[in-house]
Amino acid sequence: MPSSESGEMSSNKATVEELEKGSVIQVSSTEKNLTRRVLWKLDTRILPVLAVLFLCSFLDRTNVGNARLYNLEGDIGITDHQYDQGLAVFYATYILSEIPSNLILKKLTPQIWLPCLTFFWGVSAMCLGFVQNFAGFAGVRALLGLTEGGLLPGIVLYLSTIYTRGELALRIGVFYTAASLSGAFGGLLARGIAEIGTRGGLNKWRWIFVIEGLFTALVGIAAYFLLPNGVASAKFLTPEEREFAVNRLHASSGTGDGNHREKEASERFAWSEVIRGVFSLQTWFTACAYFGILSGLYSFGLFLPTIISGLGYTADEAQLWSVIPYAVASVITVITAFISDRFRVRGPVMLCSLPLAIIGYGVIANTKNDKVKYGMTFLMATGLYSSVPPVLGWLSNNSAGHYKRATTSALQLAIANCGGFVAVFIYPKSQGPAYYEGHTIIMGLLCGGWFLVACNVLYCWKINRDKANGKYDKYRGFGDDRDPAFKLVL
């Protein structure tokens, strides 16, 4: 023991001497260079793959709106209400699959599970191109939701294991812009595919499903060979970089990040962690706020082509004019996510971004000027999409313990995706082109979401204050988000 203490004193003395000589600056510079190299490789090898997966997810989820413009309902003999039911059944199975999918992700590994989900929903999307009646339409939509539901919560959980808490929002923002771009790309792609006409005995809308579904299935196969399970198994990193990448996650200081990651590496499934996630106030604050956001986002994505057509544009023009709001939103989303990570805040960023969408919905619901309506879609898209990376990163940042975070991430999305049911039924054709009731409902939900975000900011602030005052000392050493060393992100 004396020799050990003597060694520690000698090491401390050496550190002081190194600091006085400036050699520690050199070590810090080396670590910074390694960090840049590791992050660059992670960002360029993993994020593009996830972005393409999510792009496919949004394309296959919303291409039914594009297909509708090419007489989908008339060809298979369904009414507007049956069309809405087909959309709703997708969200039912989508929501039910999210928590189970996240809980088995660690066991099956991300490299296997995420590509498998992608492949099977691609096949399901292809099958939509061959449905002949309402039963087929609803059944395939249900299967699509079941296979696609696990992707987004799985991606968020996966990213939280390879990036530190202060790096997460920007990365979510980068891959989530794929959703924005899919709106632009989806319109352009649908416009191009429609040029195939009725070749091969298939109508225009059927070709949209077949080609986009086939593309998704091929992407799923490719993803298996491109995604690592984590930084420790990333073949594109050198042995030195892999060791450094693992150590930087374990050694994150000042936030309790390192302690909980060490515990998670050997953590086994426990129902108590699932229960902690389900009954977390943060889960419900952020999930209900996100519910309002997704209600707007899904209605925007599903019905924008129809809304623009109602303003006097043809089907082909509607596909092209729907591109621009999504493209602008994608740029603002990345900027917002960067600011969120740079200042390590989530809630305050959302309190600034949500009012943009609220203003957009308020104006578009009360104006008859077509140009003003189209202009408001820019505010709506920007406010909605730029609020998503902070809210997804926020709950993941503040949930420690793998299975608690798996539960909270999935439950947040399961609750929020109930907004799909709202989106389906509040924009019937009979209300077009004004859609006063639909826009007003979304505006009310977004106002409620803003209030819930403010509540969660205050709640996190209170928890941090209580930890500083010793009220959580009984959890010291637990290595999860109850540990006093684990500071919540506001």
Image: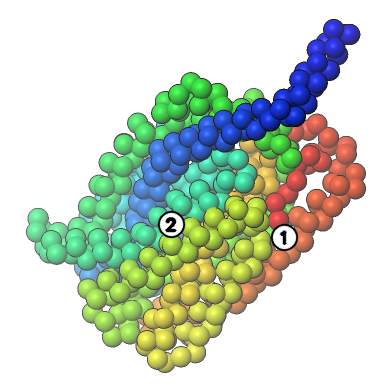
Which label belongs to residue 177? 2
Residue 13 can be seen in this image: yes
In terms of image quadrants, where is residue 355? bottom right
Q: Is residue 413 visible?
A: no
- Please state, as top left, top right, bottom left or bottom right, where the N terminus lies in the image: top right
The disc labelled 2 sits on which kind of residue? Thr
Of badges 2 and 1, the one in the foreground is: 2
Q: Residue at 58% across / 58% down in the picture?
A: 339
Q: Residue at x 51, y 79 (%)?
A: 361
Of the pair 367 and 288, the residue shown nearer to us? 367
Q: Quadrant of residue 402?
A: top right
Taking the image as shown, residue 136 lies to the left or right of residue 434, namely: left
* Label 2 – label 1 distance at C-alpha: 25 Å
Q: Is residue 189 left or right of residue 259?
A: left
Label 2 vs 1, first from the N-terminus = 2
Name the disc covering residue 337, or none: none
- Residue at the far front: name it: 21
Decide: is 15 above or below 199: above
Identify the element where label 1 is drawn: helix
- Label 2, residues with CA under 10 Å away: few <14, some 14-19, many ≥20: many
Say which amino acid is labelled 1: Asn
Kindly identify the residue that appears in the image at 69 percent across and 70 percent down: 451
Residue at the image point whose x is 33% and y is 68% from the top: 323
Helix, strand or loop for disc 2: helix
Local crowd at mark 1 within 10 Å, few (<14), some, or many (≥20)? many
Query: Residue beneath label 1, please?
Result: 456
**Residue 77 rendering spot, x and y as whole percentages:** 25, 69
Q: In terms of depth relative to the viewer, which is nearer, 203 or 133?
A: 203
Side of 283 relative to 123 (left or right): right
Counting from the top left corner in percent of width and height, residue 326 is at 39, 66
